[in-house]
Image: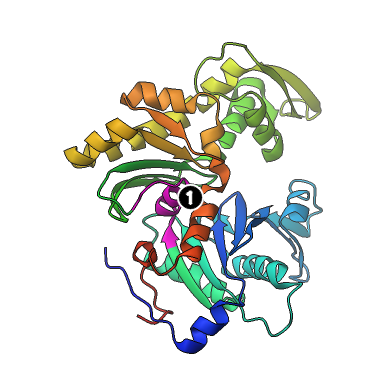
Amino acid sequence: MRRFRFRFSPFEKLIQGIAQDIGIDLGTAFSLVYVKGKGIVISEPSVVAINKRTGQILAIGNEARKMVGRTPAHIVAIKPLVDGVVSDFEVTEAMLKHFIDKVHRSNFVLVPRPRVVIGIPYGVTEVERRAVEEAALNAGARQVFLIEEPLAAAIGARLPVQDAQGQLIIDIGGGTTEVAVISLGGIVTSRSLRVAGNRLTDSIIDFAREKHNLLLGETTAEDIKLKIGSAIPLEQPLTGQLRGRDLVTGLPKQINVSDTEIREAMKGTIRLILDAVKSTVEEAPPELVADIMEHGAYLAGGGALLRGLDRLIAAETNMKVHIADDPLTCVARGTGIVLEDLDSLREVLLPSQFNKV
């Protein structure tokens, strides 16, 4: 893949010293913001609440998430990113502006606008990539650099991505699962699957409707997934409660469910993720597969926290599987590491039509 080089003028080098450059993990479910020299300072849901009558944005992030499923007809709480890519340009731009302004709110007015590194799913189209860049520039970024999420996750997990050594990263986010074999700062083989944490949640909603005639809200299904969800049978069985509306009577209804039932509901989605991992490894050169066998695969993203998923992947692939430290923040930390050393890590960035080459 063609990478790009950028040159810094003396003036650019001067303002680099005072600007607060930021890295963003622009996720389907959550967005995280890394500030150079400070670490991760923002972690908020990728949700925006809008008044449809006036077009006014009422809330972004945590405040908007509280409104999901609880708003009157003229107020909608929407997610401007679907499966990791921009579905609503203007709302995404507003959300990015919210994050950038939040970082710069306390700064002196003459502090330059930041350079921004944003993680995007592997294999997005040129149009989707351009949409992210334009949204960030319109939101106030001085320069925008894009990095593929598997590479950002691997860098955030402190893997030696620039070495001639195969690394397998499995990044399971809210909207996409990114599986990639990485060597010499690039992706050798990969799978980008638009099946991830949100699909697991949807599987629980489908299960409640089909098996119990119970209509669940997204938040309720997400909560039960976190509370008792698992990929393999547990030593200590867990139970939880589902509350929603009975589709037969229309009245409130509550049922008790076990971890076995929730695991069965999610089984099909987990199988798709396993197949993506196997396909990626099957296409990798033998030398890199040997490296992966020696060092193991690494799990990142919120999906890495599903109980027993690492052991299930290990059993299915005959590989060691490690959960990265703080897997939820791997992509954001990866963008931050690139920001901290942009000169030596420039080869991992994607070409841009907006930056000098």
Tell me the amino acid under the disc marked 1.
Gly
Residue at the limit of the structure toward the left, as seen here: 286
Specify start and end residues of the magenta stretch as a single range.
147-161
Identify which residue, 54 or 169, lies in the foreground: 169
In the figure, 8 relative to 61: above or below?
below
Residue sitting at x 67%, y 81%: 111
Number of callouts in the render? 1
In the figure, 178 relative to 263: above or below?
below
The verdict on residue 78 being magenta is: no
Residue 104 horizontal side relative to residue 139, left or right: right
Identify which residue, 83 or 122, lies in the foreground: 122
Residue 256 horizontal side relative to residue 119, left or right: right
Residue sitting at x 67%, y 65%: 99
The residue to which callout 1 is attached is: 156
- The quarter of the picture where residue 15 lies is bottom right
Q: Quadrant of the C terminus?
A: bottom left
Q: Quadrant of the N terminus?
A: bottom left
Residue sitting at x 44%, y 87%: 9
Residue 122 lies, in percent from the top left, at 39, 54
Residue 343 lies, in percent from the top left, at 40, 70
